[in-house]
Image (cartoon, helix red, strand yellow):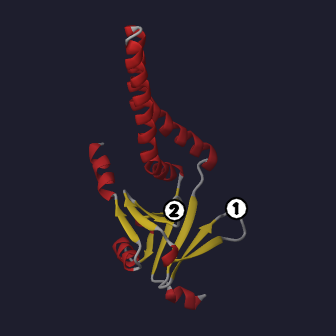
Amino acid sequence: MEKEEKDIILKNTTSLNESDITSFQLFAQKKHTIIVATIITLVLVGLGVGLCFVNAYVGGAIIIAGIVGGIIFFPYLSKEQIKRQNAVLFNGGKYVNVFEFYDDHLKVTNVDEDRDEDYFQTFEYSTLYQFVEYQEFLFIYTSKNQCFLVLKTGMNKGTIAELIEFLKNKNLKYVDKKSLGEMKKNKK
């Protein structure tokens, strides 16, 4: 065990709560939400324009419903559904993952206080898909649709800049979305 501790190049402990996971899910669903909202808007506006030839009031009402429903209500309802779902699933609990970066692999340990034994997985760097930097997180994707959330402030050994450089050197695709998070923070 002591030899294994020496071999760790970088280490991160990430403690996630319900709002952190919700923030990630909103980020991950953003593209899908925009596509669905656009489709809803276009279909209802198209239907409304067609109905304007039959009944201008009904057609106009459907155009307005399409614009308001697609641009305002659908994104709002999607966001609220994710929040409610996470409130039920996570029930205010904290979830802790420990990320240990070795020269040839990544070890992710899920620390669960309810179980006697911690659960861990290992990944060769060549099998990882990409990593994304966004707001206060790195998202390390194990496949196109699954990832781990790594809190930038959770570094126990090394710095977040060293981790990013380390992953780049392992030929992982790097996607920089941190400027999106900065713009969002500056608007508030």
156 is higher (above) or lower (below) than 146: below
Q: Secondary structure at mark 1?
A: loop
Q: Residue at x 40, y 77 (%)?
A: 171
Q: As shown in the figure, which amino acid type bears the numbered disc 2?
A: Cys
The C terminus sits in image quarter: top left
Q: Residue at x 49, y 33 (%)?
A: 77
Q: Residue at x 61, y 73 (%)?
A: 121
Residue 81 percent coordinates (x, y):
54, 38
Q: Which mark is residue 20?
A: none
Q: Secondary structure at mark 2?
A: strand
How many numbered circles are shown?
2
Q: Is 158 on the left-hand or right-hand side of 20? A: left
Residue picked out by circle 1: 114
Of the two numbered discs 1 and 2 on the same chain, state the one appearing first in sequence.
Answer: 1
150 is higher (above) or lower (below) than 21: below
Residue 50 percent coordinates (x, y):
40, 18
Please tell me in which quadrant of the rendered image residue 58 appears: top left
Q: As shown in the figure, which amino acid type bears the numbered disc 1?
A: Asp
Residue picked out by circle 2: 147
Q: Give whichever of 13, 119 is nearer the camera.
A: 119
Q: Residue at x 42, y 18 (%)?
A: 62
Residue furthest bottom in the image:
3
75 is higher (above) or lower (below) than 13: above
Q: Residues within 10 Å of mark 1 (few under 14, many from 20)?
A: few
Residue 120 percent coordinates (x, y):
63, 72
